[in-house]
Amino acid sequence: MYGNANKGMDDKFFVQRIPFIFKDSIPSGISQTNRHLLVLDGHGSHVTLKALKQAMTFGLNMITLPSHTSHAFQPLNVSCFKPFKTTLKKKCDYG
């Protein structure tokens, strides 16, 4: 969904997209005083110091799910992440 067509997701692309992705998708807004939690998988593009600093500056606290635990977190895909992704696709004109 948010990748580089030639290489897939990379750390530079992810860092560039943090403000774009979340700018209008949260009605209450995001800021240093109105922080939000971003739950990520452990993909290498997410787990960089630059990405963490960018997210913190923007008002996002990031956590990553532990490796090899997707089976335990599968219910989150249905109850939380799918509705979020659907809304995000509509807002960003991807779907």
Image (cartoon, helix red, strand yellow):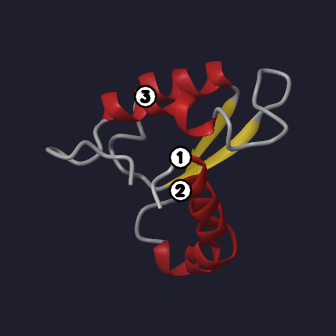
Question: Do the residues under discs 1 and 2 have CB atoms within 8 angstroms?
Answer: yes
SS class, disc 3: helix
Instruction: Identify the mark at residue 15; answer none if there is no mark.
Output: 3
Q: Earlier in the sequence, mark 3 or mark 2?
A: 3
Considering only order in the chain, which callout, 3 or 1, is on the residue closer to the N terminus?
Answer: 3
SS category of the residue bearing label 1: loop
Residue in view at x 38 percent, y 55 percent: 1
Residue behind mark 2: 89
Q: Residues within 10 Å of mark 2 (few under 14, many from 20)?
A: some
Label 1 crowd (10 A; few <14 / some 14-19 / many >=20): few
- Picture layout, residue 42 above or below residue 58: below
Question: For mark 1, what is the residue?
Answer: 92
59 versus 87 height, above or below:
above
x, y percentage for residue 27? 81, 41
Q: Amino acid at mark 1?
A: Cys
Q: Position of residue 8 (x, y in %)?
A: 23, 48
